[in-house]
């Protein structure tokens, strides 16, 4: 028995080394986009934000796949695809290599966003449920309340957000059945919130200007906050781009202007929304913890203004789902352990 135990104990250091190697490779992959952008960037064109955006995308891909090798392959494919920027543009006059070179970081980021959407569309259609819609409703209402301090028209958004939050809360704290119609509505609401936040974040980043501008003004805190906004946007960029396709599909095209093909496509899209919404009920205790933690964090942000509203929202949208997944996995292991029959001496 003693010899057998020693044999089983041998692979443990190897496993630790393997985990350490995987972690080191993952960290290298996350940092690599910023290093590449800084290496090839032009002094006259902003690029640090694109590097931060790609770092966020790589983080999300590592979370989704758990395979650094696959993520590295997608990064190399995106880098190769980005070289298309050096081809002459349509109706371009005299070819300017410098102009194309300045656009290269933006094409890298766009390529890294496109490659996963082509190769991993099914994985990138985010599974949502009562927990996700509760989280999205909380941050949307907070965003509208913050916007109301500057724009009166945001009162409409406050009413819409409050109504959606009440509907989601009723389902989160009760055992009401999640019918097909309810799942369709909540899935559409979740996709709308994420798309609206993505558009608002991009517009906000354009108004704030590049990271390099803050660094030139010796505003390191401002540069850090903008860098974080790009990073957090990247962690959800693939999901949000896929969410956009789930909404854009409802717009009629030239060949499908409210004809039979259009309504057939809408039915298929409705089914996709229904299937992606989980029928699992959220535990009331978990809903309470999420509401208290998120509400408390956003209230502190409102009072102290340590970070911008956009950064606060993205901190919530990035960290809370990971924490909820970890909690669910821990509860699953705990339940499985409790279900195992005890073995007597």
Image (cartoon, grey):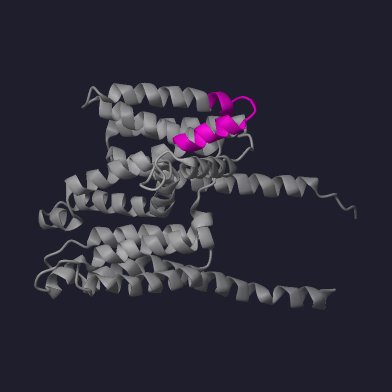
Q: Position of residue 76 (x, y in %)?
A: 39, 74
Magenta stretch encompasses residue 10: no
Is residue 243 toward the left or the right of residue 175 in the image? Answer: left
Secondary structure predominantly adopted by residues drawn in magenta: helix
Is residue 121 toward the left or the right of residue 337 in the image? Answer: left
- Dividing the picture into quadrants, the one containing residue 248 is top left
| Range drawn in magenta | 169-189
Residue at image position (34%, 61%) is 54
Position above or below: 167 against 96: above
Figure disc tally: 0
Position above or below: 9 against 183: below
Residue at image position (13%, 55%) is 213
Is residue 237 toward the left or the right of residue 340 in the image? Answer: left
Residue situated in front as seen by the camera: 343 or 280: 280
Q: Position of residue 109 (x, y in %)?
A: 31, 62
Q: Position of residue 159 (x, y in %)?
A: 37, 21
Magenta stretch encompasses residue 185: yes
Residue situated in front as seen by the camera: 68 or 179: 179
Q: Classify the position of the C terminus by image quarter.
A: bottom right
Residue at image position (58%, 27%) is 171
Asked if one can make out residue 199 in the rendered structure from this viewpoint, the answer is: yes
Q: Position of residue 108 (x, y in %)?
A: 30, 66
Position above or below: 235 against 21: above
Q: Classify the position of the N terminus by image quarter.
A: bottom right
Asked if one can make out residue 42 in the rendered structure from this viewpoint, the answer is: no
């Amino acid at each position: 028995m003693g010899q057998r135990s020693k044999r089983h104990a041998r692979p443990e250091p190897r496993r630790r080394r393997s985990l350490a190697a995987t972690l080191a490779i993952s960290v290298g992959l996350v940092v690599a986009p910023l290093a590449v952008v800084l290496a090839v960037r032009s002094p006259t064109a902003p690029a640090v934000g694109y590097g931060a955006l790609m770092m966020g995308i790589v983080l999300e891909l590592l979370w989704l796949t758990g395979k650094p090798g696959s993520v590295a392959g997608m990064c190399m494919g995106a880098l190769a695809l980005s070289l298309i920027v050096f081809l002459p543009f349509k109706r371009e006059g005299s070819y300017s290599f410098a102009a194309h070179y300045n656009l290269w970081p933006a094409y890298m980021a766009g390529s890294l966003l496109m490659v996963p959407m082509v190769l991993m569309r099914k994985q990138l259609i985010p599974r949502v449920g009562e927990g996700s819609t509760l989280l999205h409703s909380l941050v949307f209402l907070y965003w509208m309340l913050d916007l109301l301090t500057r724009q009166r028209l945001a009162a409409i958004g406050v009413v819409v957000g409050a109504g959606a939050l009440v509907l989601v809360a009723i389902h989160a704290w009760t055992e009401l059945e999640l019918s097909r119609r309810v799942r369709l509505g909540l899935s559409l609401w979740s996709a709308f919130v994420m798309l609206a936040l993505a558009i608002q974040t991009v517009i906000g980043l354009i108004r704030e200007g590049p990271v390099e501008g803050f660094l030139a003004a010796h505003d390191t805190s401002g540069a850090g906050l903008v860098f974080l906004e790009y990073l957090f946007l990247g962690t959800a960029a693939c999901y949000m781009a896929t969410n956009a396709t789930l909404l854009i599909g409802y717009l009629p095209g030239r060949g499908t202007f409210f004809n039979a093909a259009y309504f057939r496509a809408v039915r298929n899209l409705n089914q996709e929304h229904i299937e992606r919404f989980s029928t699992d009920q959220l535990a009331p205790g978990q809903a309470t913890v999420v509401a208290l933690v998120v509400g408390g964090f956003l209230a502190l942000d409102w009072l102290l203004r340590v970070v911008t509203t956009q950064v606060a929202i993205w901190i919530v949208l990035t960290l809370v789902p990971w924490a909820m997944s970890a909690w669910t996995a821990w509860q699953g292991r705990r339940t499985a352990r409790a279900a195992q029959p005890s073995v007597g001496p």
